[in-house]
């Protein structure tokens, strides 16, 4: 990312990839309950309209979390965590860890690349991750969406993460594991541009204007702003992506059909379902991830240097 002294500008792509993957996992561990609440709110109302006078099962961020804890137990807030960690090791490591490399590539080594170059780099790394890591996202979403309440007759859709991968591949074929791939490419490209470019530019301006030094308060401020911008821009495609990934075969004719069904059945506000948990999750996720990323990167780089010298 932008800024830093000469000593800070040397981490290799391998160090950045490793740091981003670990930082993404740390952020997921901290914010996963918020992500689960977001998914439950996003899929609520897709199957059928609520009877007149009946209140929605999930209401608000913390109301959703409390409902899940009371009805299913606190462990269900972390449904799909393993798939989530698989996802971060694939997604975060590439989309974040390779961002600076792609930015320099498109800028042909220029020190101050323009906004278009940054957006192109963010779109590229965001789309790249989906090509090989989509199954981890499908499994994570389905685990988070399933409500396990034996007393009400509901049963778990999948018994374990491995079972989910196998069952989806067996029942829906390999296409099932890559369900919503195009939607996720669009969503990931938007998120990456909003998240990384916003963080990059804000951090660069903070350092350029000497408002802060390249430390945790600077990283916190830039990450918080990036989280808010990303939530506003990416929420509509994120909701459609979640709905489509969680759907049973034949429920929607495609991503466009899913979006149109939401629009005509639930209205435009459906595209911002789960906005607050999305913001709380993305804001806190960005803060934890970027602060962790910067610190892990700095701690890892001297070790990498020593290993090179020893070799």
Image: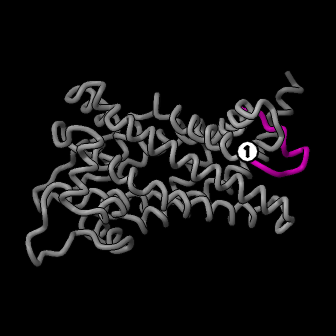
Q: Can see residue 18?
A: no
Q: Quadrant of residue 64?
A: bottom left
Mark 1 — residue? 114
At 49% from the left and 43% from the top, the residue drawn is: 188
Q: Is residue 9 above or below residue 67?
A: above
Q: Please state, as top left, top right, bottom left or bottom right, where the C terminus lies in the image.
A: top right
Residue that appears at 57% across and 34% down: 124
- Stretch in magenta: 1-13
Q: Quadrant of residue 12?
A: top right
270 or 92: which is nearer to us?
270
**Whole-percent x and y of residue 263?**
25, 57
Horizontal and vertical percent position of residue 260: 24, 50
| x, y percent for residue 167 | 24, 32
x and y percent of residue 231 in the render? 49, 60
Which residue sits furthest bottom? 53
> Looking at the image, can residue 311 be seen?
yes
């Amino acid at each position: 990312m932008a800024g830093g002294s000469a000593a800070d500008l040397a981490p290799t792509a391998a160090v950045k990839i490793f740091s981003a993957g670990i930082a993404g996992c740390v952020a997921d561990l901290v914010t996963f309950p918020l992500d689960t609440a977001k998914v439950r709110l996003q899929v609520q109302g897709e199957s059928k309209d609520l009877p007149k006078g009946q209140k929605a099962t999930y209401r608000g961020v913390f109301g959703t979390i409390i409902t899940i804890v009371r009805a299913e137990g606190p462990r269900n807030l972390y449904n799909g965590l393993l798939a989530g960690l698989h996802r971060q090791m694939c997604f975060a490591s590439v989309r974040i860890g390779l961002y600076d490399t792609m930015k320099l590539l498109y800028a042909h080594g220029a020190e101050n690349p323009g906004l278009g170059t940054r957006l192109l780099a963010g779109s590229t790394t965001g789309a790249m991750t989906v090509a090989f890591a989509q199954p981890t996202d499908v499994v994570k979403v389905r685990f988070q969406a399933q409500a396990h309440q034996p007393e009400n007759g509901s049963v778990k859709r999948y018994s374990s993460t491995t079972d989910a991968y196998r069952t989806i591949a067996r029942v829906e074929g390999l296409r099932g594991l890559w369900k919503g791939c195009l939607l996720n490419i669009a969503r990931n490209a938007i998120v990456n541009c909003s998240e990384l470019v916003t963080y990059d530019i804000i951090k660069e301006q903070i350092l350029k204007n000497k408002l802060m030094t390249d430390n945790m308060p600077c990283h916190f401020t830039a990450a918080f702003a990036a989280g808010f911008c990303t939530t506003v821009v990416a929420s509509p495609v994120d909701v459609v992506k979640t709905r489509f990934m969680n759907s049973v075969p034949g429920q929607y004719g495609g991503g466009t059909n899913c979006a149109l069904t939401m629009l005509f059945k639930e209205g435009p506000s459906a595209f911002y379902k789960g906005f607050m948990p999305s913001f709380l999750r993305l804001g806190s996720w960005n803060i934890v991830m970027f602060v962790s990323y910067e610190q892990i990167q700095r701690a890892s780089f001297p070790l990498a240097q020593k290993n090179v010298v020893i070799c």
